[in-house]
Amino acid sequence: MRFISTKIHAILDFLIGIALIVFPWILGFAGGGAAQMVLVSAGILIAGMSLLTNHEFGIYKIVPMEIHLLVDAFMGLFLMMSPWLIGFAHVEIGPHILIGILVIVVAVFSKVTTAGYSHTKT
């Protein structure tokens, strides 16, 4: 059952993207290591992809919502596994796991189409 509208999904993308970018400084691991770089890179990618997605807040509307949700799910999985894949589990794992789960949950429960919104390119 998908109950998160594409509009809410887009807002969440921007909020999660910004949170990922600033978390290393807020949580005290902004020393330039892998833990920081993964979160900042993921934040930029999530927010940037939202700008390219064919939904209410997409600017270029290149990426179909179906593909966007698939990429979100893989990004969430990568965030959850990154501390062990990249080898910084001894530094920080909490935000990577929590945000990874959040990204997957939002992707799974987000609608693919919008109500009253044309998916044609303008």
Image (spheres, grey):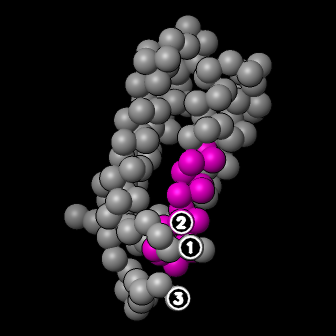
Q: Earlier in the sequence, mark 2 or mark 3?
A: 2
Q: Is 64 rendered above or below residue 37?
A: below
Tag 2–tag 1 contact (CB < 8 Å): yes
User: Of the numbered discs in the image, which one, if any, rests on residue 60?
Assistant: 1
Residue 40 in which image quadrant: top right
Q: Is residue 16 left or right of residue 78?
A: right
Identify residue type, mark 1.
Answer: Tyr
Identify residue type, mark 3.
Answer: Thr
Single out the residue that lies furthest toward the top: 90
- Predominant SS along the magenta part: helix
Measured in 3D between alpha carbons, the distance from the residue under mark 2 to the one under mark 1, in whole angstroms, is 5 Å
- From which residue to which does the magenta span run? 43-58
- Residue 80 horizontal/vertical position (percent): 42, 29
Q: Secondary structure at mark 3?
A: loop
Residue picked out by circle 2: 52
Tag 2–tag 3 contact (CB < 8 Å): no
User: Of the numbered discs in the image, which one, if any, rests on residue 14?
Assistant: none
Asked if the magenta segment contains residue 54, the reply would be: yes
